[in-house]
Image: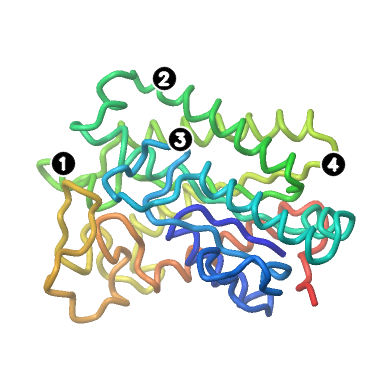
Amino acid sequence: MIPIPCSSSASLVTYIFADKLGISSPPPYLSLSPTDDAILKGVNYASGGAGILNETGLYFIERLSFDDQIKNFEATKQSMKTKIGDEAANKLCNEAVYFIGIGSNDYVNNFLQPFLEDGQQYTHDEFLGLLISTLGEQLTRLYQVGARKMVFHGLGPLGCIPSQRAKSSRGQCLGQVNLWVQQFNSKVKKLIATLNAHLPSSQLIFADTYQAVLDLIENPSAYGFKVSNTSCCNVDTKLGGLCLPNSKLCSNRSDYVFWDAFHPSDAANVVLAEHFFSTIISKSPSPAPQPSH
């Protein structure tokens, strides 16, 4: 099983998945050497700030885009071939499950930032077209390297995260942003259907958790939370939405759906991962993957 989460949030969900499957959490790619046996059991390629587009999150400096992560997976594949041979490496990659969560940064840390070029030079329709065409090429590259079973985690209601609510005079969700997200999800669903039809033996799944996340935000008490319209820590809502240095934290972080202006709290991630896991199992064309030994 070789997960490929693409951002820090996706990485947290993957850790929870690994626990539910009874396997060790996949180690970060950059912590491994090419000769480590761990590359045969799962690798985490996630990078905070990563996007479908290479320019997304550029102000995070050291973030690794989806293209960079795929290059790292290609390097892993070569190392696997050296260790166990071409046939065994191909078989392992074909049978692995790849968890992919990407796209939110392309909005929050790119298109929705007024000082960045993409939001100025593209209409949303143009930007969406660029995202989908680029993503299609990237998923095809993964397929060519050996990925067959890919799970794509759709975007949640980004218009309701604290960094976007801060743009509303009354702290409300931004309907336009949520509409754009739903258009993105719809396009990705169609892309995945097209890829499944044209790539032999491909088993791509779209995991739509938009409504589940929205329900968590709109009805936090139903899930044991008290606050869903602001973050646990004080944040800079203009750039990245991360906690400010020495910021005052909430007294009980498990009461909050959001840790900072962008990321869910650990408690919220557990709730979302449970729903995500149930969605995957219900859509899986085959039994749940077993750990490799």
Q: Residue, x 47% and y 68% (percent of image)?
A: 271
Q: Which mark is residue 201?
A: 4
Q: Counting residues from the N terminus, which is met first, the one under dot 3 or under dot 4?
A: 3
Quadrant location of the N terminus in the rendered image? bottom right
Residue 35 locus on image (x, y percent): 68, 70
Q: Residues within 10 Å of mark 1 (few under 14, many from 20)?
A: some
Residue at which label 1 appears = 167
Discs 3/4, front? 4
Q: Looking at the image, do the residues carrying marks 1 and 3 touch, with CB atoms under 8 Å apart?
A: no
Q: In this view, does 235 lie to the left or right of 277?
A: left
Residue 125 shows which numbered tag? 2
Q: Which of marks 1 and 4 is nearer the N terminus?
A: 1
**On residue 182, which mark appears?**
3
- Crowding around mark 4 (Cα neighbors within 10 Å: few <14, some 14 to 19, many 20+) is few
Contact flag, marks 1 and 2 (Cβ < 8 Å): no
How far apart marks 2 and 4 lie (CA) works out to 32 Å
Nearer mark to the viewer, of 1 and 4: 4
Quadrant where the image shows the C terminus: bottom right
Helix, strand or loop at label 2? It is helix
